[in-house]
Image (cartoon, grey):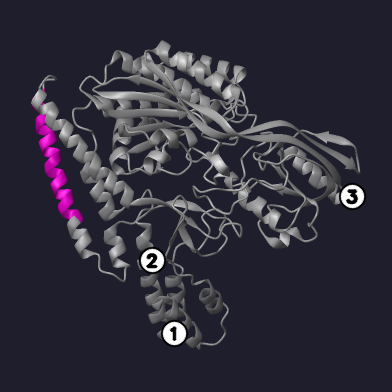
Amino acid sequence: MCNLISQDEMLKHIKYICKKYPNRIAGSEIEKNAAYYIGAEFEKSGAEVSFEEFPVLEWKPHDAKLSIYTPIKESIKCCAMPYSPSCEIRGELKFVGLGFEDKDYIDAEGKIALIELCPYDVTEDKTQYLRAVRNNVKAVIFFNSIPKTDIRIFPIVETQNWNMKTGKRPTKPILSISYENGIKLVGLLKKAKVELEISIKAEVIENAKSVNVIGTIEGAKFPDEVVLVTAHHDCWFEGANDNIASVCMLFEIIKVFKKYKPLRTMKFVSFGAEEIGALEFCPWLWTNGSKFFADSDLNIVGVLNNELLGAGDALSVQGTGAEIRKVILDTADVLKLKKKYKKIDTWHAFINSDHYPFTLKGIPTAQFSGKSALTQYKNYHTSTDTPEDIHEETLMDLACLAASSGFFLSHSLFLPYDLSVCFDELLNGNTELKARGLIQMNKDSVINLDKLIELLHRQKDLSDELCEIKNSLEKIYTGNNKEIEKYASKMNKKILEIIKKINLNSYHSVAYGEYGLHIVPIIIQMFPSLQALEDLYFTKKAIESLKDKNLSGTLNNLRNIYPYKSLSNGIEFYPPRFMPEYDLDLPFINPKEEIFSLENKKESNYEREILSLTKKYET
């Protein structure tokens, strides 16, 4: 199968699209023209093609200029950050470092703030920007934290959350410059007062349209069951790895399924407006094409999304749950990719790309990429993300993995999802994914979960029996038995219903912290609503230890209240916790005050801390 995939053809198309259609910004004419080119290639490869328009907010930068006029005269290459307002200003420059704390902005009011982009998470530019706005700066200039990668772009809205509601356009001008130019300005500031001129001309078009490109190969036996293989074509700069390489891979995969007719319908979708374009400056500003498509009435049974395929020499797989992760990893084993790469980085389906709108509906989804995290790709959202930077071997291996995984999903009589591994993960967790199962949580819970655990054990036993029935029918199926096909269709529907319920009630994205005040790490967590039960358990244990004057035991228990340290940078803080896409607060206990008090206490009288923790436990 993989011999039908041409690496040379992929690279040829990548180079052509990058040069012919750079800056494929959502809603722009360039993005539309690229979409029509993609549609033509889908058709040449053998798919029936359709186009799906949807409304977006188009960011249209016309010009951006930055000049030093004191102590020297010099122009600096720059880009306006989306969605910066237009401006013509002069002002004094103030370097505020990362700018996460109010203390960084001493004497910065009314000045232009120079900020280093967060080196461990570029999406924190919004937190940095909001802190700058709070300290009443005149404008913000970000400089890239990585040398030799030029300017980095990441859109910003002036709203303190990541929910799917209405947001606000930035009120302060925002520019982005390279690491080298940022360091040059920092060096000038050490010698003299620096004054700058900023000119930005940009507009936002509220009634623009972006396009999803859909290539279809209808299934021979189960045409109403749909498997998606997806990528996005919009980008910043040339966007070779992010993400036209993945789109060009689709051209080749279509050829595979044109030759090997699938039992289920295959849809190959190139989404528009993944990077930006949410209406009304919605803080959840990405994955707009996939959000629109996910609301269709299609019976989608699996999604294989592709992002940053050639961005490195590692293989990464995200998955909604154990059911689809097993399909992908078993496929990788057949292709001998596990042996070749030693380890395939596996993690939960995160919020960062076009698979996620389907994840929110409980549909089994997976995402392939050539790096374990977007922030590990040094050229992410920069002008150095070019065809020359593509890791060709990784691109080819991931193309084979995506095609082969799609083959297993589309050519099997029964959906190849093992319900047993789903229930096993719910019960026992997953060490590699740092997910605690219900059995472990039950040990650290103030509420007994035995009945729920017993129910899941029964469900696991039933799923094992179901698997035996499936295996028996597959052995006698000759490829043309209508009764078995009818039974398989009913069973597939039931399997998908169960998996959706599991996915919708187990893993969720959880944010920790207060927007605009400090960095807000977001993780995928199993049973986040039950986390409070563990908080209560450890608080109760801490109170008991404190009554026994066991200070170390108390601190150990309090530090088990998650998280004791920021996932990003090690800064100690505590929740609130919430589910960002639902804008839903989760219950929590914050023991920071008691930990600080106990760590600095000289005497052994702990009555105040006992009373304080008891009050938090009871409320």
Dot 3 crowding, Cα within 10 Å, few <14, some 14–19, many 20+ = few
Q: Which residue is mark 2?
A: 532
Q: Residues within 10 Å of mark 1 (few under 14, many from 20)?
A: some
Q: Residue at x 34, y 17 (%)?
A: 256
Q: Residue at label 3?
A: 192
Q: Residue 504: image x %, image y %?
A: 32, 48
The quadrant holding residue 196 is: top right
Is 473 inside the magenta-drawn segment?
yes
Residue 506 x/y as whole percent? 32, 52
Q: Which residues are magenta?
A: 456-477
Please state which amino acid type lies under the numbered disc 1.
Lys
The alpha-carbon separation of the residues under discs 2 and 1 comes to 25 Å
Q: Quadrant of the N terminus?
A: top left
Q: Which residue is mark 1?
A: 549
Give the foreground label among 2 and 3. Answer: 2
Q: Is residue 109 above or below residue 422?
A: below
Q: Is residue 391 visible?
A: no
Task: Indicate left or right for 107 with 208 as reference.
Answer: right
Q: Residues within 10 Å of mark 2 (few under 14, many from 20)?
A: some
Give the SS element for disc 1: loop
Task: Return the residue nearer the eye: 385 or 360.
Answer: 360
Q: Amino acid at mark 2?
A: Ala
Q: Tell me the quarter of the image containing the C terminus.
A: bottom left
**Precedes in sequence: disc 2 or disc 1:** 2
Q: Earlier in the sequence, mark 1 or mark 3?
A: 3
Question: Looking at this rendering, what residue extends furthest in the front direction?
Answer: 207
